[in-house]
Image (spheres, coloured by chain):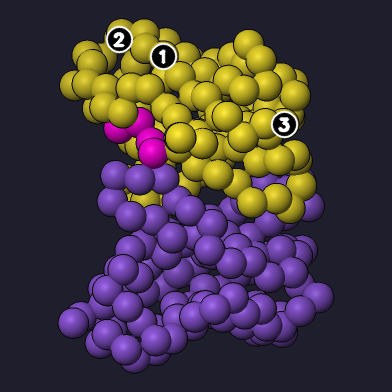
């Protein structure tokens, strides 16, 4: 029973263009969402988060959008750079503050 | 300066053996976690300790036993290893329990033969 779904296992984007990574969730009690980035042979690193009281949070080239009615969030990276090539995990926090993770999307930035 | 470190990074062992993975954080955090990344790449919480007290204990075989000698350390001991235990195990820490950013170690790649 996957409560957090990242339906695209991989995504390929041209350098300089916008990368859009999507995440869907099923539990309406989730109230905090995070994106983590992971390089091979390393642990995930925090990228950006959003609380359910907001619908947008921006940090430099990274913007996260939350659509609560659709139970959907997305991460926009613009412009995409080669160093953005990594696996991106979406995670949601439940009432016990446990993080429920998606399976990740591998982003490949083409030069 | 490694914030969250794990040892060993790689562990290859035979079925039935007992092994330990160590985790240390130098961030002064109160809460530490163990995650398992399975073959489908999902990260699943196994345990969480807050100030040396167990606060999350998911459905994990009792062959897995966490031990927190102090706030900066959370070790994972696994008895009678099975093939299905092969996975990447990540340790993480956060300032405290709650909606806090978690900082991850580099992972321990366990292969049970």
Q: Chain of mark 1?
A: B
Please report, as a chain letter, where disc 3 is located.
Answer: B
Residue pointed to by mark 1: B20
Quarter of the picture holding the C terminus of chain A = bottom left
Q: What secondary structure is the magenta-colored segment mainly?
A: strand
Labels 2 and 3: the sequence-earlier one: 2
Along the line of sight, the residue nearer the viewer: A4 or A32:
A32
Disc 2 with disc 1 on a shared chain: yes
Chain letter of mark 2 equals: B
What is the number of the mark on residue A53? none
Q: Colour of chain B?
A: yellow
Look at the image and tell me whether residue A73 can be seen. no
Residue B102 position (above or below residue A24): above
- Residue displayed at 38% across by 36% down: B107
User: Are the residues under marks 3 and 1 on the same chain?
Assistant: yes
Mark 3 — residue? B30
Residue at coordinates 48% horizontally, 53% vertically from top-left?
A45
| Residue nearest the observer in this picture, A105 or B63 | A105
Camera-nearest label, 2 or 1:
1
Q: Chain A drawn in what color? A: purple
Q: Position of residue A89 (x, y in %)?
A: 46, 61
Helix, strand or loop at label 1? It is strand
Foreground pick, B23 / B39: B23
**Magenta region, residue range:** B106-110
The reply to whether the C-beta atoms of the residues labelled 2 and 1 are less than 8 Å apart is: no
Tell whether A101 sits left or right of B72. left
**Residue identifier under label 2:** B16
Kindly indicate whether the residue at mark 1 contacts the one at mark 3 (C-beta within 8 angstroms): no
């Amino acid at each position: 029973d996957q409560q957090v779904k990242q339906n695209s296992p991989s995504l390929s984007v041209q350098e300089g263009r916008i990368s859009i990574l999507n995440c869907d969730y099923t539990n309406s009690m989730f109230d905090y969402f995070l994106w983590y980035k992971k390089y091979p042979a390393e642990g995930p690193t925090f990228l950006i988060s959003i609380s359910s009281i907001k619908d947008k949070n921006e940090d430099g080239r990274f913007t996260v959008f939350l659509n609560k009615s659709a139970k959907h969030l997305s991460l926009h990276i613009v412009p995409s750079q080669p160093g953005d090539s990594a696996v991106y995990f979406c995670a949601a926090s439940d009432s016990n503050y446990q993080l429920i993770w998606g399976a990740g999307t591998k982003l490949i930035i083409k030069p | 300066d490694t914030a969250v470190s794990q040892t060993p990074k790689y562990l290859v062992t035979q079925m039935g053996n007992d092994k330990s993975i160590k985790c240390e954080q130098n961030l002064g955090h109160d809460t530490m976690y163990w995650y398992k990344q399975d073959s489908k790449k999902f990260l699943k919480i196994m345990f969480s300790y807050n100030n040396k007290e167990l606060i999350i204990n998911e459905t994990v075989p009792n062959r897995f036993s966490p031990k927190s000698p102090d706030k900066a350390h959370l070790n994972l001991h696994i008895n009678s290893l099975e093939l299905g235990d092969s996975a990447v195990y990540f340790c993480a820490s956060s300032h405290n329990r709650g909606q806090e950013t978690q900082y991850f170690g580099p992972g321990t790649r366990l292969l049970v033969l």
